[in-house]
Image (cartoon, rainbow, N blue to C red):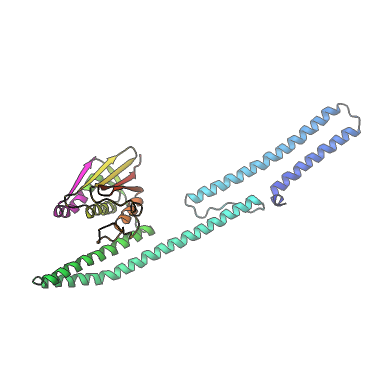
Amino acid sequence: MKIFTNKQIKHLFLEALLCLFLFVLAGTFLALFDVPHKAAFIFAAALAAFGAVFAAMCIYFCRQNHMIENAEEQIDEYISGNRSARIECSEDGELYKLFHRINSLVSILNAHGEKETRSKEFLKNTISDISHQLKTPLAALNIYNGILQDEAKELPDIRKFADLTEQELDRIGTLVQSLLKITKLDAGTIRIEKKEENLSEMMREIKNRFSFRADREEKQINLTGDDTIILSCDRGWLIQAIENIVKNALDHTDKGGCIDIEQKRFQSVVRVVIRDNGSGIHPEDIHHIFKRFYRSRFSKDTQGIGLGLPLAKAIIEAHNGSIEVDSRVGVGTTFIINFLTER
């Protein structure tokens, strides 16, 4: 029987049999001989046998409980980040087989984790190398295109195509930079250096960066909310994330549109709400907008590359934050960003 491969169970079973045998032997002896107070002796023998079996069971279950507690401690150690944590399983038995399987699973998870880390590092290095290789020809193309624009001042058709070329070169440059940033975030090679920052000042900086475009397109960017909120964050990265969302709002808002940025503070959460009255997001797309390179069949935007919102989400999550979206077609879109704050 498999159950008896466990030495502790085998010892418990033998101890119980021994106690039963001794009790039967004592009862037989008392039955064969005329012993005064025979019933009392038989009762005492039964009580002793029961006590011995009970003590053996208590010792066995205490050992089992200690073994399970040790296994739980090792599992908690592994969850806490100690990848070398293992459960002791040097004996035979079904429970030890289970512990051995858990240790094997841990080894497999470690191997997969190391493989994924190497894959991310390879992807980061590859995209980094490609981006660096592209910088030189892109810079040269921008210079050549600038010369064409200067020489084509009196040639409207050539000037028009030179301007379009400039737009496309800018798109390529943005794509390369966004890919490099998002792969670095994925690989965990970017260090988020948090400092105490005034959130309102950051929002004003973002507004100032888009003020020229907003004026040119006759759109408004409004800032509201608590001006005293202090948030522990990496200023540069968080501004990049919120800029991407504001740019997305401007891209999908018609002339005369409005983008509202509001910051609120709750007991344990700082919230940034970015709301626009633009074209909105189709219900079919609402669950896919944070996917990389996702293109909606309903979108009229032909310039976007599909990395702005995924990059924003990655940066926000790197700050232990979350982002949600609510939208109605023809009414507008609202992005809600929450950051947990330390009490």
- Write down the quadrant of residue 212 in the picture: bottom left
- Where's residue 59, x and y in %? 67, 41
Q: Does residue 79 appear to the left or right of 53 in the view shown? A: left
Q: Does residue 322 appear to the left or right of 135 in the view shown? A: right
Residue 170 or 60: which is nearer the viewer? 170
Is residue 197 visible in the rendered structure shown here? no
- Assign the C terminus to one quadrant of the image: top left
- Name the residue: 25% across, 72% down: 137
Is residue 310 visible in the rendered structure shown here? yes
Residue 37 or 265: which is nearer the viewer? 265
Disc tally is 0
Magenta region includes residue 219: yes
- Where's residue 112, x and y in %? 48, 60
What span is in magenta? Answer: 204-226
Magenta region includes residue 47: no
* Residue found at the very far left of the displayed protein: 154
Position of 194 relative to 294 (above/below): above
Residue 169 or 109: which is nearer the viewer? 169
Position of 37 relative to 293 (above/below): above
- Name the residue: 79% across, 30% down: 44
- Write down the quadrant of residue 151 in the picture: bottom left
- Where's residue 149, x and y in %? 13, 70
- Name the residue: 50% across, 58% down: 110
Residue 260 or 1: which is nearer the viewer? 260
Position of 111 relative to 37 (above/below): below
Q: Does residue 216 appear to the left or right of 61 in the view shown? A: left
- Where's residue 157, x and y in %? 13, 71
